[in-house]
Image (cartoon, rainbow, N blue to C red):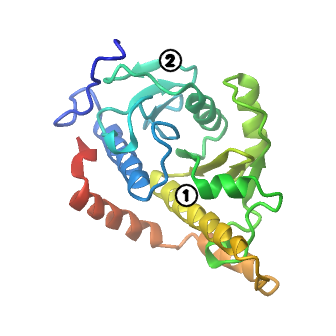
Amino acid sequence: MNADAPPKLFSPSRPVDIAEAEWQVRVDLAASYRLFHYYRMTDLIYNHISARVPGRHDRFLINAYGLMFDEITASNLVVVDNDGNVVRDTTGLGINPGGFTIHSAVHMARPDVFCVMHTHTPATVAVSCLQCGLLPLTQQSMRFTDRVAYHDYDGVYFTDDERRRLIESLGSKLVMLLHNHGSLVCGRSIVEAFDIMYYFERACQTQVAMLSMGEALVQPKEGVAEQVAGVFEAPDRKANTRIWPALLRLLDRIDPGYKS
């Protein structure tokens, strides 16, 4: 495609060749992109969020390389397979090779993961550069007590070896700080991944603010951080089922184009 030609950004309705289940995933994934834009968790056209194509273990949806997050719609998300072959791309823009490296690694190695999110926000990058990592000092950060993996930064590579290293670092966790780089969050659904990412971002923001004051910090009592983390992992926790509809109502008021 001519780089100067405008990409096709949306479809007025669900294309007939996209199944209803895939369309719903597309709508929720596009909503995630718009919410990242709304909550200022973007980095121009960089960073990415992906989700599996329902019923296909070897394919996932991701953003076209060149669109801002507030341009992402259900219909312009790109389908790519685990080998990097673009299966469907109405924009003609293709995908970010770095994004493919990260997301394909997780989708191939972690069948329990449905959605993967990667950011370079100032707060997550700042905390990724701290030797102490994320400190369990606030209710938001206690949620992640002993549940954050760390990955050493070796530069910008798009290789199978980097995919292997990422997976070795991530292990069975859902959250990882990429040293000197940013964050990686996984979820068993788009809703879960967004909930984790939003509060992980807030935890990092709060830590940066706390450390900037240069004052002694109040340490929680022994066992408190783990207790808080356990509450957030409780199988009967209903917050996600209430948060997501509320977020979609917000988007429908201010930015409803994500559904096209």
Which residue, given by chain and number where applicable, does mark 1 sit on?
197
| Residue 63 vertical position relative to residue 87 in the rendered view, above or below | below
From where the camera sits, is residue 102 visible? yes
On the picture, is 180 further left or further right than 23?
Answer: right
On the picture, is 133 further left or further right than 126?
Answer: right
Q: Identify residue type, mark 1.
A: Met
Question: Mark 1 falls on what kind of element?
Answer: helix
Mark before the other along the chain sequence, 2 or 1:
2
Question: Mark 2 falls on what kind of element?
Answer: loop
Foreground pick, 206 / 8: 206
- Residue 111 coordinates in the image, percent (x, y): 61, 41
On the picture, is 205 further left or further right than 133?
Answer: left
Q: Identify residue type, mark 2.
A: Asn
- Residue 62 coordinates in the image, percent (x, y): 45, 34
Name the quarter where the N terminus is drawn.
top left
Q: Residue furthest left?
A: 12
Q: Residue at x 34, y 12 (%)?
A: 2
| Residue 118 vertical position relative to residue 173 in the rendered view, above or below | above
Please state which of the two labelled residues, at mark 2 or mark 1, is closer to the viewer.
1
Q: Residues within 10 Å of mark 2 (few under 14, many from 20)?
A: few
Q: Residue at x 67, y 36 (%)?
A: 109
- Residue 23 coordinates in the image, percent (x, y): 31, 39
Cα distance in 3D space between marks 2 and 1: 28 Å
Which residue, given by chain and number where applicable, does mark 2 sit on?
85
What number of labels is visible? 2
